[in-house]
Amino acid sequence: QVQLVESGGGLVQAGGSLRLSCAASGRTFSNYDMAWFRQAPGKEREFVAAIRWIGSLTNYADSVKGRFIISRENGKNTVSLQMNSLKPEDTAVYYCAAKVVIVTDYNYWGQGTQVTVSS
């Protein structure tokens, strides 16, 4: 079992930056692939970014590529999402997710943190 707790959300103006953090506990963090998803009001949850357990392999949704950076520190059991050049359409609840390397779907989720970008 893995417990995930997000922090760092808030209100920011368009063009600004925010850094989200996710603290993990419960199991060996380095054995898990980590990701960020988001859900805007009235929309389905969507993938934002992921980082493999190795740490050097990342991938991003096209909508955030070049603006967001995902990183992890296995020694601190944390994964972060640096969000730059924020747009109003980035407004959503952001969720941290984890999965064991050998499975396909993310099956551990945090409670979410709200990010609001004003125009």
Image (cartoon, rainbow, N blue to C red):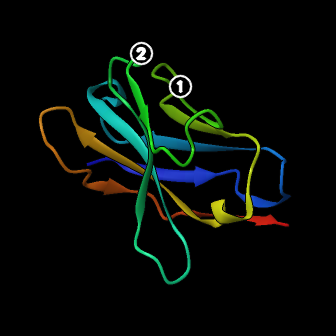
Gap between marks 1 and 2, in whole Å?
16 Å
Image location (x, y in percent) of residue 108: 31, 54
Q: Nearer the viewer, residue 22 or 81?
A: 81
Number of the label disc, if any, that sits on residue 38: none
Q: Is residue 61 left or right of residue 33?
A: right
Tell me which residue sits at (52%, 42%) in the image: 23
With respect to residue 100, does 57 lie above or below? above
Task: List the residue tagged with mark 2.
Answer: 56
**Could you say where residue 72 lies in the image, as x and y percent from the top left?**
50, 26
**Residue 83 picture quarter:** top right
Which residue occupies 84% across, 49% down? 15
- Quadrant in which the C terminus is drawn: bottom right
Amino acid at pointer 2: Ser
Name the residue beneath numbered marker 1. Answer: 76
Q: Tell me where residue 106 appears, x and y as whole percent.
A: 26, 50
Nearer to us of marks 1 and 2 is 2
Q: Relative to residue 101, is residue 7 drawn left or right?
A: right
Lower position in the chain sequence, tag 1 or tag 2 = 2
